[in-house]
Image (cartoon, rainbow, N blue to C red):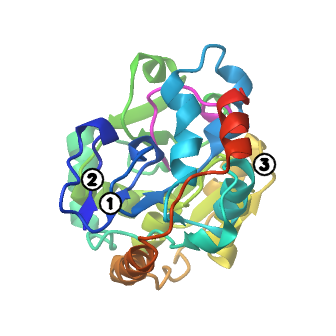
Amino acid sequence: MLVTNRPSATVRTQGTDVFHSPWMDGAMLHSPCPMVVTVHDVAELKRRSEHLHPTLRLRLRPLAVQRAAAVIVPTAAVAEDAIALLRLDRDRVTVIPEAADSSMYPRPAAEADALRSRLGLPERYLLSVGGLEHPEPGNPIGRLAASARQMPLVMAGPTRRWAHELPGVVLTGELPDEQLAALYSGAHALLICSERDGSARAGVEALACGTPVVACESPSLREVLASRASFVAAGDMQALVAGAEGAARPAPEPLPWRWEDAARATWSVYAGALARRDQPRLAPPRLRRRTLGAQ
């Protein structure tokens, strides 16, 4: 088996039984062996109008995924979108939820306080976790930052210049898992404002660290977190902040799903892909023409 995060152009698959790309970007148009592709979300395909001059790679990506022997998605909500937008065979799509890393568990107060002191964070804070590299439709992080609140808002994740212009927030940058677990543990609550979170990964991690979660409504978040999180109407930042500031500990029990469970489920997908290795995975010509032309 070959699993890689590298772009497909740099991958050597000679002698490989099954090739797994954990991202759509790594999907091959011509894989010499059965290919498995993980699709985390298809939000980019829902907003094609933003790509005024789409690259050839962007146009060919759906075609490459159509040729996969199997596709893994984190939720049933993402599965339905992927089947519709990527025109995938339903029987080749498998839902395998994501899990919290083993390093995600409630950290002692002393550890959380030490991290807070090192990063210059306030004693009590609300937390938002996710990439801040560029503003994205469906992720009203700017409105969240500008919302009135009583507790400071800490945002963790990789940043670029625009993020440092967000008003009234504390940025930590990207943190290793050990520190992120301490950051979760010390937070009053985690806020999830994005309507595009396909896996609810931050919510799963926060619960594993004993931190309450308040989120804006979205199919994937509701599917994964269910009664373990509090939900407000999508886009209502004031309700989100109010819910987070009013959150009470202890947080609900973390999800029982572990990465070991995900690994076993993924291995079963590999076995199924290998069993179908002699079946050609070319999209029908009609779909190929539509995929290339639909922008």
Q: Out of 50 and 172, give the one closest to the viewer.
A: 50
Disc 2 and disc 1: Cα gap in Å?
8 Å
Give, as a single range, the part of the protein colored magenta: 128-141
Q: Residues within 10 Å of mark 1 (few under 14, many from 20)?
A: many
Circle 1 residue: 19
Q: Main secondary structure of the magenta part?
A: loop
Residues at discs 2 and 1 in contact (Cβ within 8 Å) = yes
Residue 13 seen anywhere in this rendered image of the structure: yes
**Does residue 139 appear left or right of residue 179 in this picture?**
right
Q: Earlier in the sequence, mark 3 or mark 2?
A: 2
Q: Out of 207 and 9, give the one closest to the viewer.
A: 9
The amino acid pointed to by label 1 is: Phe
Quadrant for the C terminus, please. top right
- In reply to whether residue 136 is colored magenta, the answer given is yes
Q: Residue furthest top?
A: 53
- In reply to whether residue 61 is colored magenta, the answer given is no
Q: Nearer the viewer, mark 1 or mark 3?
A: 1
Residue 138 seen anywhere in this rendered image of the structure: no
Instruction: Say which element carries label 3.
Output: loop
Q: Residue at x 77, y 56 (%)?
A: 232
Q: Residues within 10 Å of mark 2 (few under 14, many from 20)?
A: some
Q: Earlier in the sequence, mark 2 or mark 1?
A: 2
Q: Residue at x 62, y 37 (%)?
A: 44
The location of residue 42, given as percent across then percent down, is 62, 46
Q: Residue at x 33, y 37 (%)?
A: 172
Q: Out of 163 and 3, give the one closest to the viewer.
A: 3
The location of residue 84, given as percent across then percent down, is 75, 54
Query: For residue 4, which numbered disc appears in the image?
Result: 2
Circle 3 residue: 234
The amino acid pointed to by label 3 is: Ala
Instruction: Say which element carries label 1.
Output: strand
